[in-house]
Image (spheres, helix red, strand yellow):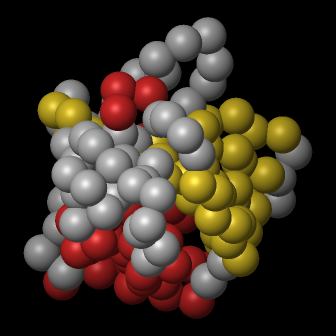
Amino acid sequence: MNPKLNLDKLGLKLPNVSSPGGSYLSVNTRKDIAYVAIQFPILNEEYKYQGRLGEEITTDQGFKAMELCALNVLAQIDSKIGFENILGLNHIDAYFQSGKDWDDSPIVVNGASELFVNVLEEKGTHSRAIFGVEKLPRNFSVGLTATFTLKNE
């Protein structure tokens, strides 16, 4: 597994690591589990994909927004843990805000799921949960949390 080479093959780069927006850690490690705090579609400090899915944001844009959230998760892992220190991705929780008649959340969350598998290969397989919420901070359309198992050395 070579995540950085896989990113290059996909024509993608890891964004700059964002700082927490409050009193918490971006990555919190307990024994061999790393918990990544919610990541939003932010590209190098620039807010992207703000609005409701099915209204201001299309399903295709939502897919790209969730992909960007996943890139931010990977940037946090690379910066704070190192790809070489992970056994694999365990689970993701995906959050979205949408208009009342929009119902394509699985398609949008595939933006993250597919990226994790394409970049981390077998270490990127995971379970997931999807939550529709009334409002996300800064009017982001989506957000993503993740847990990873770390090598026990």
Task: Determine if residue 34 is in view.
Answer: yes
In x, y percent, where is residue 41? 31, 46
In x, y percent, where is residue 34? 71, 48
Pick out the residue farthest to the top: 23
Residue 122 occupies quadrant? bottom right
Q: Going 29% across and 80% down the picture, which residue do you hit?
A: 6
Q: Is residue 149 above or below residue 88?
A: above
Pick out the residue farthest to the left: 11
Q: Going 75% across and 62% down the picture, which residue do you hit?
A: 149
In x, y percent, where is residue 82? 51, 52
Q: If the image is split into quadrants, where does the C terminus sit? A: bottom right
Pick out the residue farthest to the bottom: 122
Q: Nearer the viewer, residue 55 or 150?
A: 55
Tag count? 0
Q: Going 70% across and 45% down the picture, which residue do you hit?
A: 35
Relative horizontal placement of residue 150, taking residue 134 as reference (left or right): right
In x, y percent, where is residue 116? 47, 74
Task: Determine if residue 76 is in view.
Answer: no
Relative horizontal placement of residue 56, taking residue 71 as reference (left or right): left
Residue 152 occupies quadrant? bottom right
Q: Is residue 8 above or below residue 137?
A: below
